[in-house]
Image (cartoon, rainbow, N blue to C red):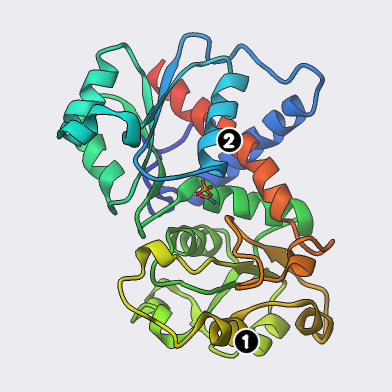
């Protein structure tokens, strides 16, 4: 297969396993390109991309922009805080006005789950979901799996535990879809209040004992407590959360084996993960960020080839 089965990247849920492998093979090529002294290719000189962000971002926003520029696309950036959204303009009007400037592709982060799906039905452009509320964050899951593949050789058959606020996490949902599609074994671990009811229906197991979960896994993906999405208190205090679900050096060293540490960022150092763990040689947190550029180059390149 040399092209994606989809026109938009709205979620991992809509991808086939062969799409993921195509994205990884394409990212392998772009990773080699961005490690050259000249990090740019002329592939998308005729494509214009708008990055529209209705929510804060560091990694996703900057790596999409860098990926687009390294493919030689023309890039415009929109941040809702400085826009006419503040004067009451709707999402569809906003995007149609941007598209009127001859834009081919929209990369969007939005606080509302399903915002990208909604947009894809109402505008004539390829849409890439850069995170929609607590729903999906597909490029994060792709770069996470790509980083596991890079460190451990393969994703199939690996034991991966996702720890923390599963209930509000788009990273967790997209990772579950991506990991299961590739044949990994997945457990989720966290306070019962932050585990969605019926999560087992996605083919994952629940483990509420962190030590047991860590002794089982090859890879742990530590999630941030998303205070911005918590309307009520889901655990007594942050200190108690850290005691039960935080990973520190002593806990890691007491395990039967050396496991790989991942985190999508931003990190709450000292809450879900201590600094000595985040910065240890077991951590691939900055490799994830590095791989985000190659993965986003691959996604944009493959989607653009469908609109050319
Ligand atoms: N991982 C992630 O989505 O980080 P940002 O919110 O900084 O983009």
Which of the 4 image quadrants contains residue 243? bottom right
Asked if marks 1 and 2 touch (Cβ < 8 Å), the reply is no
Cα distance, mark 1 to mark 2? 34 Å
Marking on residue 229: none
The answer to which of 1 and 239 lies nearer the viewer is: 239
Instruction: Give whichever of discs 1 and 2 has the lower sequence position.
Output: 2
Viewer can see residue 7: no
Q: Can you see residue 221?
A: yes
Of the 4 image quadrants, the one containing the C terminus is: top left
- Give the x, y percent position of residue 277: 76, 68
Q: Is residue 68 above or below residue 213?
A: above
At 80% from the left edge and 23% from the top edge, which residue is drawn? 36
Q: Which residue is mark 1?
A: 243
Q: Identify the residue at horizontal 15%, vertical 34% (top origin).
A: 88
Nearer to us in this view, 248 or 252: 248
Query: On the image, which quarter does residue 259 sit in?
Result: bottom right
Residue 278 occupies quadrant: bottom right
Look at discs 1 and 2 and give the one toward the viewer: 1
Q: Position of residue 286 (x, y in %)?
A: 72, 49
* Mark 2 Cα-neighbour bin, 10 Å: few <14, some 14–19, many ≥20: many
**Position of residue 160 measured from the top left corner of the image (x, y, whole percent):** 63, 71
Q: Which residue is mark 2?
A: 63
Q: Is residue 122 above or below residue 248?
A: above
């Amino acid at each position: 297969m040399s092209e994606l089965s989809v026109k938009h990247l709205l979620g991992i849920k809509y991808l086939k396993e062969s799409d993921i492998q195509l994205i990884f093979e394409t990212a392998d090529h772009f990773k080699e390109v961005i490690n050259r002294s000249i990090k740019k290719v002329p592939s998308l000189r005729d494509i214009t991309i708008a990055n529209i962000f209705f929510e804060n971002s560091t990694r996703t926003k900057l790596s999409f922009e860098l990926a687009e520029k390294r493919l030689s696309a023309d890039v415009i950036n929109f941040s809702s805080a400085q826009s006419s959204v503040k004067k009451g303009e709707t999402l569809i009007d906003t995007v149609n006005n941007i598209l009127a400037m001859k834009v081919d592709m929209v990369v969007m982060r939005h606080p509302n789950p399903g915002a990208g799906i909604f947009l894809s039905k109402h505008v004539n452009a390829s849409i890439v979901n850069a995170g929609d509320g607590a729903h999906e964050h597909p490029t994060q899951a792709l770069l996470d799996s790509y980083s596991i593949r890079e460190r451990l050789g393969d994703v199939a058959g690996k034991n991966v535990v996702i720890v923390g606020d599963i209930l509000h996490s788009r990273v967790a949902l997209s990772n579950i879809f991506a990991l299961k599609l590739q044949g990994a074994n997945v457990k989720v671990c966290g306070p019962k209040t932050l585990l969605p009811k019926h999560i087992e229906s996605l083919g994952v197991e629940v483990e509420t004992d962190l030590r047991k979960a860590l002794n089982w896994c090859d890879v742990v993906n530590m999630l941030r407590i998303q205070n911005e999405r918590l309307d009520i208190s889901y655990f007594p205090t942050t200190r108690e959360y850290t005691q039960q679900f935080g990973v520190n050096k002593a806990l890691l060293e007491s395990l039967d084996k050396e496991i790989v540490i991942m985190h999508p960022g931003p990190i709450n150092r000292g809450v879900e993960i201590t600094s000595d763990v985040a910065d240890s040689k077991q951590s691939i947190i900055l490799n994830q960020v590095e791989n985000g550029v190659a993965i986003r180059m691959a996604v944009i390149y493959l989607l653009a080839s469908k609109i050319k």
